């Protein structure tokens, strides 16, 4: 039978162990660490329980290492040294990295996903300037293609026109139905898209560019609204729904920052009403270090920032 791997000891336990070895007594180690002596003793006991053997014995004047303690000492020392080296490396990069990162995104992603990333990035790399551009998906791709921005987060449902612009998947965002609470027909958390038949549907997009994202999805299930009102900003969708002018369709990211108590938001069924969100990169042989650092943070934080908030799904849907 397979057994679960044991969790490694905490860094505080290792630090207490090394301090006792260096200073010779639990009391002296506690003073050096600015901790209470019973706390240091508890750390050593936890470490010995984890390893299943005694590491230290109390001698007449100072604590001595057991054979197991002597064997463990170089590994504990190396572990803490590696972490200190890692801290130094991050500080060195953070203090020396300079440059500029130009980030684009659609409104929902800018508000919920990109904004917290910019805050974290600036804390890590205070020497890097960050510029933000908000636009619809087609414009974002154009800006990347012409080199006006370095990275763009946009929905992949809008067909890509510049095939020399590389991209990669970040997450899947739900599309949700927005209604007035007094018009909500049921208490279900899942909306029926067939209920959009014959009514006014309000969506955000680029009216001049003929964005067909929502219309295409409705066509695929044979639903014909009475009319489709297309506006530029998600906040306008919400305002029109609040005035009773129709039912809104919004990405879940935008819904999170625009829905108030007067309105109700419900999920639409998968997989049709999930849309893929990708990051598009400026085509460079050698990307700038600051741009690469932001892209890495983007990849790392995409699931963490959106998982469990009805906006993200893995590839398996």
Image: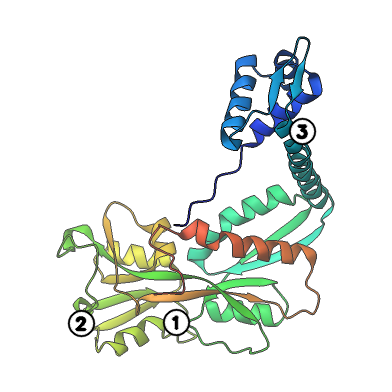
Q: How many neighbours does mark 1 have within 10 angstroms: few (below 14), some (14-19), or many (20 or more)?
A: few
Residue wearing tag 2: 197
Q: Which mark is residue 207?
A: 1
Q: Earlier in the sequence, mark 1 or mark 3?
A: 3
The front one of 28 and 283 is 28
Could you tell me which secondary element the residue under label 2 belongs to?
Answer: loop
Residue wearing tag 3: 70
Q: Quadrant of residue 151?
A: bottom right
Percent of width and height locating residue 237: 36, 68
- Residue at 61% across / 72% down in the picture? 152
Q: Is residue 20 left or right of residue 40?
A: right
Query: Where, quadrant-wise, is the C terminus in this rendering?
Result: bottom left
The front one of 109 and 54 is 54
Percent of width and height locating residue 111: 51, 59
- Residue at 20% across / 82% down in the picture? 197
Say if 11 sits above or below 208 in the image. above
Could you tell me which secondary element the residue under label 1 belongs to?
Answer: loop
Q: Earlier in the sequence, mark 1 or mark 2?
A: 2
How far is the residue under mark 2 from the one under mark 3?
Answer: 76 Å
């Amino acid at each position: 039978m397979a057994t679960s791997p044991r969790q490694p000891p905490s860094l505080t336990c290792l630090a207490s162990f090394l301090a006792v070895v260096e200073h010779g007594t639990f009391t002296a180690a506690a003073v050096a660490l600015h901790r209470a002596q019973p706390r240091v003793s508890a750390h050593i006991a936890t470490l010995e329980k984890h390893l299943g053997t005694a590491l230290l014995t109390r001698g007449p004047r100072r604590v001595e290492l057991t054979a197991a303690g002597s064997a463990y000492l170089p590994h504990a020392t190396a572990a803490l040294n590696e972490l200190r080296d890692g801290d130094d490396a991050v500080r060195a990069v953070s203090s020396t990295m300079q440059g500029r990162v130009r980030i684009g995104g659609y409104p929902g992603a800018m508000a919920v996903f990109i904004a917290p990333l910019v805050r974290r990035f600036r804390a890590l790399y205070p020497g890097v300037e960050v510029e933000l551009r908000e636009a619809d998906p087609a414009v974002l791709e154009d800006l990347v293609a012409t080199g006006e921005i370095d990275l763009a987060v946009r929905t992949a449902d809008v067909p890509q026109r510049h095939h020399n612009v590389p991209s990669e998947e970040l997450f899947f965002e739900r599309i949700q139905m927005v209604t007035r609470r007094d018009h909500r027909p049921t208490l279900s958390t899942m909306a029926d898209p067939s209920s959009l038949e014959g009514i006014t549907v309000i969506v955000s997009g680029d009216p001049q560019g003929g964005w067909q994202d929502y219309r295409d999805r409705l066509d695929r299930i044979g639903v014909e609204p009475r009319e489709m009102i297309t506006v530029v900003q998600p906040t306008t969708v919400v305002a029109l729904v609040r005035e009773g002018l129709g039912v809104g369709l919004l990405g879940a990211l935008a819904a999170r920052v625009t829905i108030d108590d007067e309105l109700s938001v419900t999920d639409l069924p998968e997989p049709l009403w999930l849309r893929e969100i990708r990051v598009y990169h400026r085509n460079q042989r050698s990307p700038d270090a600051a741009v690469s650092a932001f892209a890495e943070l983007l990849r790392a934080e995409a699931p963490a920032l959106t998982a469990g908030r009805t906006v993200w799904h893995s590839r398996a849907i």
